[in-house]
Image (spheres, rainbow, N blue to C red):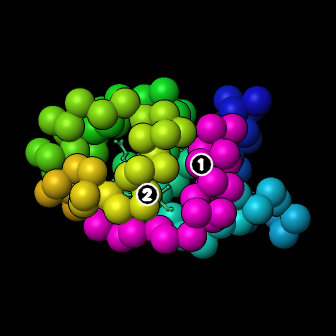
């Protein structure tokens, strides 16, 4: 499914059509992801921005996206992204990975849960 979406997006992009926005009635986690993370992270396409793309992030080793310049702190952290480590990281990134360039804390536990669920579905 993911690959179908990518293929669709890339054909739209190569046709010069803007990528469609997430639909209004998307799952809460998807909307929250767009609002809280979307300025820095892409997930529908494996493209890096201010932050690395988050496609397939659950199950990924930290600091391993090709072509993204990570902080040494995150690259050498030895963290593996699971729902549990993501929960800790999002609550206070710098406390978990001292020296990371992602410093924003996400204090709402309900929102974190919804976002992590969404990340796991991508
Ligand atoms: C202001 C920009 C910004 C926002 C907003 C942001 N991040 Fe990040 N994020 C970054 C940067 C920059 C990095 C790379 C940090 C480093 O190299 O130390 C990063 C790294 C990450 C990583 C590690 C990825 C990897 O490949 O190891 C995860 C997971 C992550 N962010 C999740 C999120 C989620 C989920 C949200 C929203 C709740 C979010 N981020 C919001 C900038 C941001």
**Which residue is more in the foreground, 81 or 2?**
81
The C terminus: image quadrant: top right
Q: Determine the residue located farthest toward the right in the rendered image.
A: 25
Residue 26 % position (x, y): 82, 59
Residue 103 located within the stretch drawn in magenta:
yes
* Helix, strand or loop under label 1: helix
Residue behind label 2 places its C-beta within 8 angstroms of ligand 1: yes
Residue at label 1?
116
**Which residue is more in the foreground, 31 or 91?**
91
Instruction: Check disc 1: other Cα within 10 Å, few if <14, some if 14-19, many if 20+.
Output: many
Residue behind label 1 places its C-beta within 8 angstroms of ligand 1: yes
Query: Ligand 1 quadrant?
Result: bottom left
N-terminal of the pair, mark 2 or mark 1, is 2
Q: Which residues are magenta?
A: 102-122
| Apparent side of residue 102 relative to residue 45 in the rendered image (left or right) | left
* Helix, strand or loop under label 2: helix
Please report the residue visible at 39 percent of the width from the left and 69 percent of the height from the top.
105
Image vertical order of residue 91 relative to residue 11, above or below: below
Image vertical order of residue 53 relative to residue 66, above or below: below
Q: Is residue 95 visible?
A: yes
CB under 8 Å between callouts 2 and 1?
yes
Residue 105 located within the stretch drawn in magenta:
yes
């Amino acid at each position: 499914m993911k690959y179908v979406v990518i293929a669709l997006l890339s054909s739209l992009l190569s046709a010069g059509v803007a990528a469609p926005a997430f639909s209004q009635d998307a799952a809460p986690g998807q909307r929250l992801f767009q609002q809280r993370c979307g300025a820095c992270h892409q997930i529908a396409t494996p493209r890096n921005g201010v932050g690395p793309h988050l496609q397939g992030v659950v199950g990924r080793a930290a600091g391993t996206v090709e072509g993204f310049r990570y902080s040494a702190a995150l690259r050498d952290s030895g963290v593996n992204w699971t729902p549990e480590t993501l929960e800790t990281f999002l609550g206070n990134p710098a406390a978990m990975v001292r020296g990371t360039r992602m410093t924003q804390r996400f204090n709402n536990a309900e929102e974190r849960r919804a976002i992590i669920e969404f990340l796991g579905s991508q």
